[in-house]
Image (cartoon, rainbow, N blue to C red):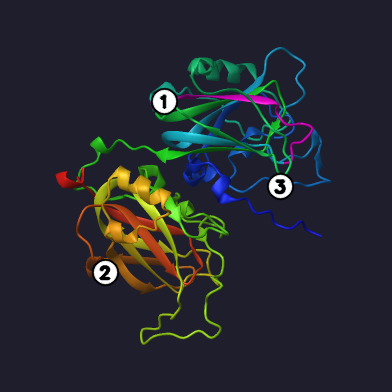
Amino acid sequence: MAARPVTENAKELPDFMQLNDLACQTAGGKVLFATDDWFASAENLLKREAAQWKANAFTEFGKWMDGWETRRKRIPGHDWCVIQLGVPGVIHGFDVDTSYFTGNYAPRISIQAACLDPDEVPNVPPRGDKTGTAALEEEFKAINKLKSNLWTELVPMTVLQPGYIDTHHNYLPVQLLERWTHIRLNMYPDGGIARFRVYGVGHRDWSAVSQDQTVDLAAMVNGGVCVGYSNAHFGHPKNMLGIGRSNVMSDGWETARRLDRPAVLKVDDHGVLQVPGCEWAVFRLGHPGVITRVEIDTCQFKGNFPDNCKIEACAMIPEEEMESVRLNWENDQDLKWKLLLPVTKLHPHLQHFFEGSAIKMSETITHVRLIMAPDGGISRMRLTGHPSTLPTVNQ
């Protein structure tokens, strides 16, 4: 019989867990180098899905593990790997997840970082399937050009906890809030780590973007970030800011079914369900701007898409956002939300596009609130517009 799901109290999680995973494979993160991949390759660290356990799975190299696991070290030194972030940005914290690594987890780690220009990164040999191997001399020679051992230390040597259900998450905050492009993860001296999450906010050079240019101001690559939500039972709303279209339901925002939905559902003259409740998520744009086009994508959500949605927007200063986060966005009257996209019927597994007269605001905004009714799933939200400057009174 399968184990019952375990609820993790969101109030006990560090704040940075709500931010985007800048190193995830689906965001373009990749491993450039690892000293050893004997039992399981370092690429597993960056998988979007949670680690799995297969009790009876073995390979020719030993026990199959869903993570990065090196051999028991019998030579001087320690194991380490270099990761290129998929989205360069400001890192607020890490989750070093040791799931299922119990008698073989890495006992200690440290984390270093660098901000490199593309021309500073050497051509490293393609990794391919590295299981059962250690780094070759030519690979060491190429990666050593980065001098990663001298990179800035974001997390000093830290003891990890084993991969049991109540200890596998090792949350590590970052104090040095600067832009980074590459990470060096050191394990001391060897062992296994299931997943490595790098939580932060994407950072784009907006000085190179003309105000006549249209961009997705909410995209994670442009600095968009979720700053509050009502429910994320099956999938976090930050997933809606991801790259490309989703290929699984878990790569989107999906709520639980609301328990206050009527026993018998009714619709109004426009076919909109008449329900008392809704779910919401608030996002800070990567740059203030004027929205000219909205996309709501219900890709993969076929029997569980929302009946309808609307989007509200406003401009606020950082202090107002901080207070709203503290109050879980219950200070609605103080924020003066305005309608950006009116109540709109949604359809299953479909990209919905809205522009022209469907967009009800032409002012510069900083935040949006997406409201779905009564519940369900949305895979992507795109807010295309022109970056602009807030009026002086709001700065």
User: Residue 28 at x, y = what percent?
Assistant: 49, 41
Alpha carbons under labels 1 and 3: distance apart: 33 Å
User: Residue 115 at x, y = what percent?
Assistant: 41, 25
Read off the residue under disc 3. Answer: 52
Which quadrant of the rendered structure holds the N terminus? bottom right
User: Residue 170 at x, y = what percent?
Assistant: 62, 35
Alpha carbons under labels 2 and 1: distance apart: 41 Å
Disc 3 marks a residue whose amino acid type is: Gln
Above or below, 62 relative to 155:
below
Read off the residue under disc 2. Answer: 358
Classed neighbour count for the residue bearing mark 2: other residues with Cα under 10 Å, few (<14), some (14–19), many (≥20): some
Which quadrant of the rendered structure holds the C terminus? top left
Above or below, 174 relative to 49:
above
Residue 4 falls in image quadrant: bottom right
Classed neighbour count for the residue bearing mark 1: other residues with Cα under 10 Å, few (<14), some (14–19), many (≥20): some
Residue 314 visible, this orientation: yes
Give me the residue at 60% from left, 31% from top: 127
Q: Nearer the viewer, residue 52 or 309?
A: 309
Question: Do callouts 1 and 3 mark residues in contact (Cβ within 8 Å)?
Answer: no
Q: Nearer the viewer, residue 90 or 143?
A: 90
Read off the residue under disc 1. Answer: 115
Disc 2 marks a residue whose amino acid type is: Ala
Region of the chain picked out in magenta, as a range: 100-117
Give me the residue at 63% from left, 16% from top: 137
Q: At numbered mark 2, what does the secondary structure look like: helix, strand or loop? A: helix
In-image side of 32 versus 193 (left or right): left
